[in-house]
Amino acid sequence: MVPARVPGTYAGRLRKAGTIQPMRRSIPTANAILILALALAACGSSDPNPSTSPVPTSTETPEPSPTLTPEPTPTPVPEVEVPLAVVTGYINATAAISLTEVEAAMATMLVHCDVVEVMGQRRDDTECSSLPENEDALGVDPELLALLPPSAVVPTLKVLPVDGADLFGNAEARELSYPITGRAVGVEAHDPAQIRTLISLGDSCPDRGVAFAAITQGRGWDWVFGGGTAAYRAVFPNPVGPGQVGNGFNIVDAVRTGNEGAVAELVSAADVTLDDFECPVVDNFTVNDGVVFSIDPAVLPRLRDTYGVDVATLAANHLFDRGTPGFLETLAQFEAAGIPTTGAGPDLDAAMEPVFLEVSGLTFGFVAFNEIPGSLEAGPGQPGVLWLRDDNVREAVTRARAGADLVFCVPQWWGGAEYHAKFIGDMRRQQELFFEAGCDHVIGHGTHWSGPIEITPADDGDHRVTMVSHGNFLFGQEWSQQTQEGVILELAFRGTELAQARMHPYIMLEQAQTNLTDPETDGRYVLDRIYEASGLCCGAAP
């Protein structure tokens, strides 16, 4: 706060400070004449040594007068013109908004205190809320909306695209003209070039129902990879008899609603697309109906070109379903397709090697681990997958940390059981191990169900995300709603800082084709299960 100034003239202020004394009253005129005469007489005397005694000179050093310190002028905080992110509660079902809807809600929206102007209108700075206040308010009432400078966005709040323009979306959405602008103080300008997105697909093993539709029924792999959108006709109790797999779980009857290619459009548009691939890819594949799998090599070019997969993790329990020869051929098939892999190799050293991907000057690093029985464990001179052991985690993450700005641990873990949406067994300790070893984020698979998700503060003030499992992506299991549904995970980064963690719900139709569902209606089933398992909610699904 600038100190208050003393009222009055400059001299008046100095007098109050004690540096100028008040002037004495005027001397009467007669006395003045007498004094003047005596002074002239003294000046005319010829005596060089007058009898008058000299005035003694003081030996004391006079104290210096106090120096007036200029009152400080506060440095003005510059205003920055920025787009204003429309945010809502993380579990709010709303996924997007229009400018018309924003304008209609403007009177009741929370506004960050750094924002001084919205759409050309200056604000009353007494009506604002800080970031913690916004987080608290939106946590209590997720349906509220707020306006934040992009630099104040945190992943525990959901940013809504406005008429398709998305400050934290893919490159195309970031380049669209954003309609809500303002001015803010003490914030960083928003630079779309600093935003990168990563999408993770989930568990993929396109055999069984997937291969049956593509090959046996003759629909082709382009049909499998051409999924669009779907809607539910009914959700009803599972009719499987007592004691059989699936007993007690609902199943979904759903139909396609068009938008062919919507899944591919979503996942291929990310700056980095990751897939957890679980099964061997061999030339002598077969269409299987059991739990021993093999995959048509024609799948890999479509993963690369249609879904835009940039890296695949192979630390999985079915990689040896065709033995060691099939495993080694799988490594060769991915290499021939130009899809880098991690988590598996001809020996332990190779299985530990990270995959590095550079995007606009930012390097992503990936390492992967498995703990579910089935595959051989990589060792010195032993082909296999990288096992989820403490020493392996520390060594693999150290290698990744040496070359990456962001490091992702991608475990196929389960805590000792499949088909659940919980942290069980050793999973909590393993989660801490990943972070202590130097991983920034954990993107998990292996339980065939979606959830939970955790977004927690990191030691450096950033946030870190753990996704325990996405669910089945290309993996036919229609015997329960939990195995029919899943989510595609999308992470957005501002530099190395996590800004958003979004989930896009989908359903596998006919055990073969992935189709997106509306998060405000049918998609809420899987999202609410994730939120409930994460301790975040929940309202009942419709």
Image (cartoon, rainbow, N blue to C red):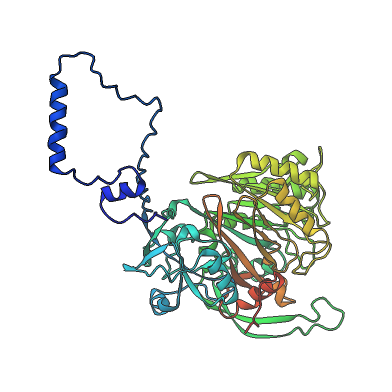
Q: Name, please, the residue furthest toward the front.
A: 51
Q: Quadrant of residue 501?
A: bottom right
In depth, the one of 63 and 182 nearer the eye is 63
Residue 35 in view (yes/no): yes
Q: Is residue 186 above or below residue 531?
A: above
Across and down, in percent, residue 279 comes to 73, 57
The residue lying toward the viewer, choosing from 137 and 202, is 137
Q: Quadrant of residue 125?
A: bottom left
- Count up the numbered dots: 0
Q: Is residue 407 above or below residue 492?
A: above
Q: Quadrant of residue 99?
A: bottom left
**Could you tell me residue 437's position as x and y percent?**
72, 46
Residue at horizontal 50%, vertical 65%? 130
Q: Residue at x 53, y 78 (%)?
A: 143
Please state the horizontal and vertical placement of residue 440, each as a whole percent of the image.
64, 51
Of residues 258 and 8, which is closer to you in this image? 8
The percent coordinates of residue 154 (x first, y second) are: 55, 61
| Residue 281 in view | no
Q: Is residue 215 above or below residue 275?
A: below
Image quadrant in which the N terminus is located: bottom left
On the rendered structure, is 290 left or right of 134? right
**Residue 384 appears left or right of 70:** right
Image height of 439 relative to 204, above or below? above
In the rendered view of the protein, which quadrant contains the C terminus? bottom right
Q: Residue at x 33, y 68 (%)?
A: 122
Q: Is residue 191 left or right of residue 345?
A: left
